[in-house]
């Protein structure tokens, strides 16, 4: 049976296609994504090519070293995460009204204690949990719309509707090449970036917001700032270019390694920021949700004692 024709400019993206796309975003490798999805790598590649053709844009750059998400791909990823997350949230609500919905900033859960990770990955029988992953802005949007009960994220802008409870402090670090003049410095300060080309994650990240503020206050002109969704791209570029510095939140470096890259701390205290459990107090919370909040915070306290 022939596929239905679509009007010009219209593309039918169902949940399965979006889940395929998000899985490729996760691995940036067709073979690994195909293994997780139980499909062939060739079939997955064809599906992504069809999506790119239907959308009339490139979602990934195919390089000799792997896939790189394009700006269009990043934009679709944000939309796809919202749509797929909504669908999964609906499924959870239909099957279990007691489910606790949490959105967590990308990569942050790797810095949480093992007991909290187990809780968030729905391994504690006392609390069914649906975990969503996203960027700081996505966490804020989901809280405002009431789609999640809690967010694990950077405390949001001044808003009396939100109440944050600090979980841990993150820091912004610099990645320098072992042959860089900065490699011998015990620590860095903002002034050392003057005249240096550097890369950061995109404007959606707390890293770039803090960095740009510090550069403006120090009256240091911006040399170079590419917005990469995948921190691995920044690590790879610094690994091959001694003249470029990469700047990331330290939780992105969990488990990351490159032979030519050295991680440097910034001296300034203001290069740190808090990760908190955030709730929207303008919405009525159930007794079960309040119990969950206290339980998660108690797990954090025990792990930090």
Image: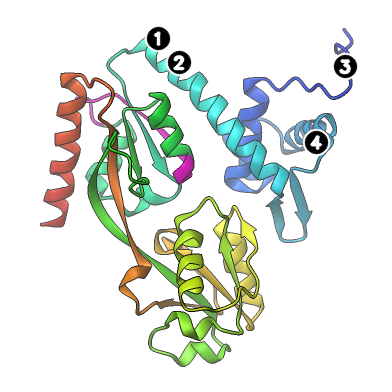
Which of these two is toward me, 70 or 206?
Answer: 206
- Residue under label 2, please give it: 90
Measure how far apart labels 2 and 1 are at the Cα level.
6 Å
What kind of element bears circle 1? helix
Res 127 visible: yes
Measure how far apart labels 1 and 3 are at the Cα level.
34 Å
Instruction: Look at the numbered discs 2 and 1 and tell me whether their residues touch, using CB distance below 8 Å.
Output: yes
- Residue under label 4, please give it: 52
Q: Position of residue 87 (x, y in %)?
A: 51, 19
In the rendered view, does 34 fall on the left or right side of 145? right
**Colour scheme in use:** rainbow
Nearer the observer: mark 3 or 2; the answer is 3
* Count of picture labels: 4
The answer to whether 296 is drawn above or below residue 95 in the figure is below
Report the magenta residues as a range: 124-137
> Was residue 126 drawn as part of the magenta stretch in this picture?
yes
Q: Earlier in the sequence, mark 1 or mark 3?
A: 3
């Amino acid at each position: 049976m022939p596929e239905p024709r679509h009007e010009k400019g219209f593309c039918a993206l169902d949940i399965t296609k979006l889940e395929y796309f998000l899985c490729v975003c996760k691995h940036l490798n067709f073979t690994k994504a195909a293994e997780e999805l139980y499909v062939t790598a060739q079939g997955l590649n064809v599906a992504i090519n069809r999506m790119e053709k239907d959308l009339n844009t490139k979602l990934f750059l195919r390089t000799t070293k792997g896939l790189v998400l394009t700006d269009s791909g990043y934009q679709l990823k944000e939309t796809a995460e919202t749509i797929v997350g909504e669908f999964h949230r609906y499924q959870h609500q239909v099957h279990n009204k007691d489910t606790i919905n949490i959105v967590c900033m990308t990569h942050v859960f790797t810095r949480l204690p093992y007991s909290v990770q187990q809780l968030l990955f729905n391994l504690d029988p006392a609390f069914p949990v649906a975990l969503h992953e996203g960027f700081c802005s996505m966490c804020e949007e989901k809280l405002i719309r009431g789609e999640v009960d809690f967010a694990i994220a950077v405390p949001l802008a001044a808003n009396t509707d939100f109440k944050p409870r600090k979980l841990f402090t993150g820091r912004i670090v610099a990645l320098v090449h072992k042959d860089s003049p900065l490699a011998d410095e015990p620590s860095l300060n903002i002034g050392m970036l003057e005249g240096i080309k550097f890369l950061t994650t995109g404007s959606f990240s707390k890293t770039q917001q803090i960095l740009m503020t510090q550069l403006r206050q120090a009256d240091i002109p911006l040399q170079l700032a590419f917005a990469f969704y995948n921190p691995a791209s920044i690590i790879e570029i610094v690994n091959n270019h001694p003249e470029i510095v990469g700047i990331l939140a330290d939780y992105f470096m969990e488990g990351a390694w490159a032979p030519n890259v050295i991680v440097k701390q910034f001296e300034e205290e203001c290069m740190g920021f808090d990760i908190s459990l955030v709730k929207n107090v303008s919405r009525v919370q159930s007794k079960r949700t309040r119990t969950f909040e206290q339980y998660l915070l108690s797990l954090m306290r025990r792990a930090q004692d």
